[in-house]
Image (cartoon, grey):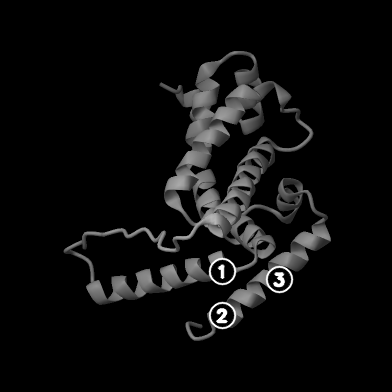
């Protein structure tokens, strides 16, 4: 059980320092704070929830194993997103190789959702279709644009943090965000 002190008052950097000092509760709080945002980030990069969950676990395993390699040169969140981003990029490279070697192209997952009886089915269907279409178009973006769009517009990270995570200059981050947004607008102009 994580103490209320850890949940509300302590910075991420303080938590990693406590974890480096052997405080397991600090690790638990870091996992609690970052599980949702990191899963969202990884999923939007690779587009597969099962793999995203596996990569999230791998990210936290690497946090556990490499906790002593964190130095307060950058924010802790930047360091952790970099780990997750590198794992996602490696998975994308492996998938490209697998796809090239695979003879089968039917790898589609199908998810069934039960409707909420109190909801307006037409409005909900329209919202789901729009969300699905936007997510699909984000996944169709080239990786360099997809990464910055997810980090900026979905994860709401600063341009500086994105530059640190992706190890690219600030101007490149801004340029890619703008170009990625323009590409999305062009592809989604029928919805706008």
Q: Which residue is mark 3?
A: 178
Most extreme residue toward the top is 22
Question: Could you say where residue 58 lies in the image, as x and y percent from the top left?
Answer: 54, 34
Count of numbered tags? 3
Question: Could you say where residue 122 lies in the image, as x and y percent from the top left?
Answer: 26, 77
Question: Would residue 133 appear left or right of 80 to someone viewing this image?
Answer: left
At a point 71% along the width and 52% down the height, the residue shown is 162
- The earlier-in-sequence mark between 1 and 2 is 1
Q: Quadrant of residue 174?
A: bottom right
> Is 155 rendered above or below residue 121?
above
Q: Which residue is mark 1?
A: 140
Q: CA distance from mark 1 to mark 2?
A: 10 Å
Q: Residues within 10 Å of mark 2 (few under 14, many from 20)?
A: some
Q: Residues within 10 Å of mark 1 (few under 14, many from 20)?
A: some
Q: 140 or 39, which is in the foreground? A: 140
At a point 71% along the width and 46% down the height, the residue shown is 165
Q: 83 or 103, which is in the foreground? A: 103
Report whether residue 9 is seen.
no
Q: Mark 1 or 2, which is nearer the eye?
A: 1
> Is 15 rendered above or below residue 85?
above
Q: Which residue is mark 2?
A: 187
Q: Quadrant of residue 142?
A: bottom right
Quadrant for the N terminus, please.
top left
Q: 84 or 75, which is in the foreground? A: 84
- The earlier-in-sequence mark between 3 and 1 is 1
Most extreme residue toward the bottom is 190
Q: Which mark is residue 14?
A: none
């Amino acid at each position: 059980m994580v103490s209320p002190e850890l949940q509300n008052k302590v910075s991420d950097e303080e938590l990693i320092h406590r974890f480096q000092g052997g405080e397991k509760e600090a690790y638990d709080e870091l996992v609690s704070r970052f599980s949702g945002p990191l899963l969202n980030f990884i999923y939007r990069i690779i587009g597969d929830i099962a793999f995203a969950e596996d990569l999230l676990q791998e990210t936290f395993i690497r946090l556990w194993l490499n906790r002593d390699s964190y130095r307060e040169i950058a924010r802790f969140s930047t360091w952790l997103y970099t780990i997750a981003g590198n794992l996602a990029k490696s998975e994308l490279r492996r998938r490209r190789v697998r796809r090239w070697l695979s003879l089968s192209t039917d790898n589609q997952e199908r998810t069934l959702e039960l409707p909420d009886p109190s909801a307006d089915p037409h409005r909900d269907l329209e919202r789901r279709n729009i969300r699905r279409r936007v997510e699909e178009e984000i996944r169709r973006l080239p990786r360099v644009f997809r990464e910055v769009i997810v980090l900026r517009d979905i994860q709401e990270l600063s341009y500086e943090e994105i530059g640190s995570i992706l190890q690219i200059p600030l101007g490149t981050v801004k340029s890619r965000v703008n170009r990625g947004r323009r590409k999305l607008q062009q592809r989604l102009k029928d919805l706008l």
